[in-house]
Image (cartoon, rainbow, N blue to C red):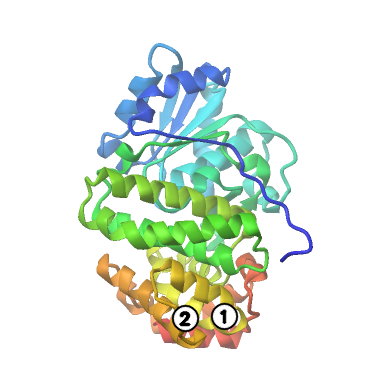
Amino acid sequence: MQEFFEFGLGGRVQYKAGLAKELGNLVHDLGAHQAFVIADKGVIAAGLLEPILAGLGGLVSVAGVYDNVPPNSSLATVVEAAQAAREAEADILIAVGGGSPIDTAKGVRILVTLGGEIPQYEGYNTITHPLIPLIAVPTTAGTGSEVTVVAVIKDETENRKISLASRYLVPDVAVLDPELTLTLPPRLTAATGMDALSHAIEAYVSTENNPFSDGLGLASIDIIANHLRDAVHEGHNLEARSQMLMASCMAGIACSNSWFGVIHAISHAIGANYPVHHGTLNSIILPYGMQFNAPVAPERYVRIARAMGVNAGGRNDEDVIADGISAVKTLAADCGLPLRLRDVEIPEEALPELAALSAVEAAMFWNPRAATEEELLALLREMW
């Protein structure tokens, strides 16, 4: 047990099928009048903004909609969206979509409230004041950004991802409406689900683990192991979608308190240089990161294996852990995700540079096992 730890639940979480249609009451209760909506074009194309705008009607004015958010949010995107929100005189932001729109909104609320430039807020606890209110409405079950203290924004000029972390970044309210996830395509359902699994597992083995995040992490692993396949292969299964949305949120709270490790360090290094979906990268890296860390935290990886459905009774730890790692690989394969870096067109000659970048990623700070650049290169070669 940690000698000291701090745990925060963050903002409010509301769950209900169809809740997006009642968003006006929530905004009104927060005392806001001019809502600015941030989404992406996928959300617009899927018609997911319509129930939200309808739910705002009559109670709150929609001051503007910004939908030019790319799959990996960038500094330029945040600046452009912040300017639009200022011009609209918005007094509340509503983010609709996956991690990119929600992280974009987190960046926007910084610039709208405090001004300046995003890089000056890089790091941890650099934001010391409350920000313009934010409601996050996830349409994927993966990032958990609707409840986290973290925002990740790509600096395209330097090919790196800027991490911001502050309790003031946590959205005021997370609105979990599983109906908004019903149209998510199978591949994205799978990738975002494995993203949530990586959050739960990394939080559980992090050097900052604590009993509160442990409980949420293990419960999330169990739910994902039992419901992700159904969500992928039976997209309109509302029960599976509901379970995945809650598991993602729970994993988000866990990792927001206990942080990440080698999986996200490598994923951030690759994602800053190659246009591969973050959840897909985490899915590929996850079993290799588990194998790398297992020797220093075997008892935790036994618990993870049990949460994945592995029978641990009367068996030695090494076999149980190996079956747990195999269960993660099988889950990804059953959901149709690629299993190697070469499958997502990461060139072999890029591995040394990616190892060097991974070694200095902030996420490595909380990994239970220290890693040299040479060890990370060997790990990358294993997964290539």
**Residue name at image x 45 percent, y 71 percent:** 306
* Residue on which the image places disc 2: 321
**Residue name at image x 34 percent, y 79 percent:** 342
Horizontal side, residue 311 vs residue 82: left or right? left
Q: Nearer the viewer, residue 67 or 182?
A: 182
- Residue type at mark 1 is Pro
- Residue type at mark 2 is Ile
**Residue name at image x 41 percent, y 29 percent:** 65
Horizontal side, residue 150 vs residue 16: left or right? right
Horizontal side, residue 164 vs residue 25: left or right? right
* Residue on which the image places disc 1: 298
Percent from the top left, x then y, of residue 12? 56, 35
Residue 11, compared with residue 126, is above or below; it is above
Residue 277 shows in this picture: no
Identify the secondary structure beneath mark 2.
helix
Percent from the top left, x then y, of residue 365? 67, 69
Residue 319, compared with residue 29, is above or below; it is below
Identify the secondary structure beneath mark 1.
helix
Whether residues under marks 2 and 1 lie with C-beta atoms below 8 angstroms apart, the answer is: yes
Q: Quadrant of residue 334?
A: bottom left
